[in-house]
Image: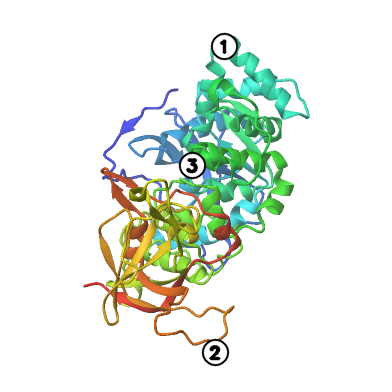
């Protein structure tokens, strides 16, 4: 029997007859369910749900919730409950597959009371146990003809230790179908499932994974090596030459969907036994960079979904009452002394933070301060054939420098700070004693420098005394988080050019170019 879909205003809540009983928060309590093999007398999918713990035998569902505007009714313990379309479609398929052996399932939308902040905090905090102790995780890609065709074609390819040869065979089939196979694989890569924040730990913590689409059930190892290889070449014109230099960061030039999809395919291809080995040394900021563009209804989940698999996030507390600013502060506490400036922009973009007051202790007008240590720029005078074309160039980046007054301005090369930043130069100008401003060479706007002082260079002799006309080589400048964002994300031709959504090798290695001054704060005016 077909479901009767109901459209609803997303701003309203549709009441359900079924109500969850509170879980016991003092132990690892969870809810589990079974989808019954028969429909109700009124033709509804029905299931039974009960309380249990993470030591039970169960299968976790990994899926996309989908829009809440289209929902259907099911029965839970004989009472009506509304579910979204994608989950209903899974339950319909799973019911038919479970006619002989009922699966015990954990499904977040049904097994967590979504109306209880306390329960969500409790369940999310033990999500690593829920998924790592499950006997299996089902990756549900929905009802999709294109994805079904793509997987069916991949399964028909002749198995070969060389994924290159499998891709070559696939190219022939793509030509025979007038490019239909390529379009089908784009449907796979761009499926919203791969950009869902929570699937990261759902996949990486799984003991075993099955991929479901339509009524197909696929062992990942049968397609993942091929799928990973195909992702590296499918964007090339006419499918180009197959790329074999799989060095880290090669996918950075691909779109977010391709980078994320390739990440998961690579890990699924290695099998669950090797997944933790591949990820057990990942810092949180590295996971952010490897998985750009992850989406979630709650911004919190872009961080919370990674804390169980990151090596440096044990002190992040799950709290859905926290503001993005509070989450930002928790991340700053982690990277206060090991943060490249590109990490700052990456984190702000991920949290959709545009302005950064500190919400701690009710002080909503406190703004974080960072210390940025930079070498003063050295210039080289370049003489060309015509005197009018003579100019100064930056000794670091070799780019031509705009004219500036070396008596009043101290210049710094942005590329010396981080290679991921848009190339330009910074000029710090003394306004009066103890008062400085800073600007970019390609932007006339200037901003306040909270403090500007010579930096201690450990390589220099502490006893060295600078002459009256000498200038230190290295400087500490103290800037607010807002000024950092304005300096490195500028308006140009009505288009906002932001720092690329990737981090540099220094950030991955934990090297710092900017330091969060935990005990120093600026105050908003």
Q: Can you give x and y, in whole percent of width and height, for residue 260 in the image?
A: 54, 41
Pointers 1 and 2 in contact (C-beta within 8 Å): no
Going 53% across and 32% down the picture, which residue do you hit? 189
Q: In the shown orientation, is residue 79 left or right of residue 262?
A: left
The residue that mark 3 highlights is: 195
Q: Can you give x and y, in whole percent of width and height, for residue 99 in the image?
A: 62, 30
Q: Earlier in the sequence, mark 3 or mark 1?
A: 1
Q: Earlier in the sequence, mark 1 or mark 2?
A: 1
Q: Is residue 521 above or below residue 325?
A: below
Q: Quadrant of residue 314?
A: bottom right
Q: Secondary structure at mark 3?
A: helix
The residue that mark 2 highlights is: 463
Is residue 111 visible to the viewer in this orientation of the structure? yes
Q: Which mark is residue 177?
A: 1
Of tags 3 and 1, the one toward the viewer is 1
Front residue of this view, candidates 389 and 354: 389
> From mark 3 to mark 2, how far is it between C-alphas?
56 Å
**Colour pattern of the rendering:** rainbow
Front residue of this view, candidates 66 and 394: 394
Is residue 47 visible to the viewer in this orientation of the structure? no
Q: Quadrant of residue 235?
A: top right
Front residue of this view, candidates 348 and 36: 348
């Amino acid at each position: 029997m077909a479901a009767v879909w109901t459209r609803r205003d997303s701003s309203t809540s549709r009441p359900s007859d079924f109500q969850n009983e509170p879980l016991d928060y003092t132990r690892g309590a969870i809810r589990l369910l079974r989808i019954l093999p028969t429909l109700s007398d009124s033709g509804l999918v029905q299931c039974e749900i009960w309380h249990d713990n993470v030591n039970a035998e169960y299968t976790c569902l990994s899926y996309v919730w989908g829009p809440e505007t289209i929902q259907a009714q099911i029965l839970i313990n004989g009472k009506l409950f509304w579910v979204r379309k994608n989950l209903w479609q899974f339950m319909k398929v799973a019911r038919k597959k479970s006619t002989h052996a009922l699966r015990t399932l954990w499904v977040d939308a049904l097994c967590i009371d979504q109306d209880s902040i306390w329960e969500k905090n409790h369940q999310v905090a033990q999500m690593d146990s829920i998924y790592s102790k499950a006997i299996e995780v089902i990756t549900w890609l929905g009802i999709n003809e294109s994805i079904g065709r793509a997987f069916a074609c991949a399964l028909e390819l002749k198995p070969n230790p060389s994924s290159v040869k499998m891709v070559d065979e696939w190219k022939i089939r793509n030509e025979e179908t007038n490019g239909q196979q390529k379009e089908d694989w784009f449907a796979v890569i761009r499926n919203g499932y791969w950009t869902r924040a929570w699937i990261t730990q759902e996949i990486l913590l799984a003991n075993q994974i099955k991929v479901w689409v339509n009524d197909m059930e696929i062992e990942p190892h049968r397609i993942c090596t091929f799928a990973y290889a195909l992702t590296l070449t499918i964007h090339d014109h006419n499918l180009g030459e197959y790329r074999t230099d799989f060095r880290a960061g090669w996918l950075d030039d691909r779109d977010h969907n391709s980078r994320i999809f390739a990440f998961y395919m690579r890990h699924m291809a290695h099998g669950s036994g090797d997944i933790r080995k591949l990820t057990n040394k990942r810092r949180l900021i590295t996971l952010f960079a490897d998985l750009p563009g992850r989406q979630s209804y709650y911004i919190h989940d872009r961080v919370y979904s990674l804390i169980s698999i990151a090596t440096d996030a044990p002190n992040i507390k799950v709290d859905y009452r926290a503001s993005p600013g509070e989450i930002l502060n928790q991340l700053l506490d982690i990277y206060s002394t090991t943060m490249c400036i590109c990490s700052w922009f990456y984190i702000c973009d991920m949290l959709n933070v545009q302005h950064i007051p500190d919400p701690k202790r009710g002080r909503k007008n406190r703004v974080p301060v960072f210390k940025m240590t930079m070498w003063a720029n050295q210039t080289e005078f370049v003489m060309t054939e015509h005197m009018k074309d003579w100019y100064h160039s930056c000794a670091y980046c070799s780019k031509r420098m705009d004219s500036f007054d070396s008596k009043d301005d101290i210049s710094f090369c942005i590329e010396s700070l981080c290679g991921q930043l848009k190339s330009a130069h910074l000029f710090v100008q003394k306004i009066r004693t103890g008062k400085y401003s800073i600007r970019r060479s390609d932007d006339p706007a200037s901003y306040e420098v909270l403090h500007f002082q010579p930096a201690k260079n450990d390589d220099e002799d502490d006893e060295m005394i600078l002459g009256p006309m000498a200038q230190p080589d290295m400087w500490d400048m103290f800037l607010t988080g807002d000024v950092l964002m304005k300096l490195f994300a500028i308006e140009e031709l009505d288009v906002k050019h932001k720092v690329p959504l990737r981090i540099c090798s220094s950030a991955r290695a934990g090297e710092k170019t900017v330091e969060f001054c935990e005990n120093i704060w600026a105050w908003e005016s």
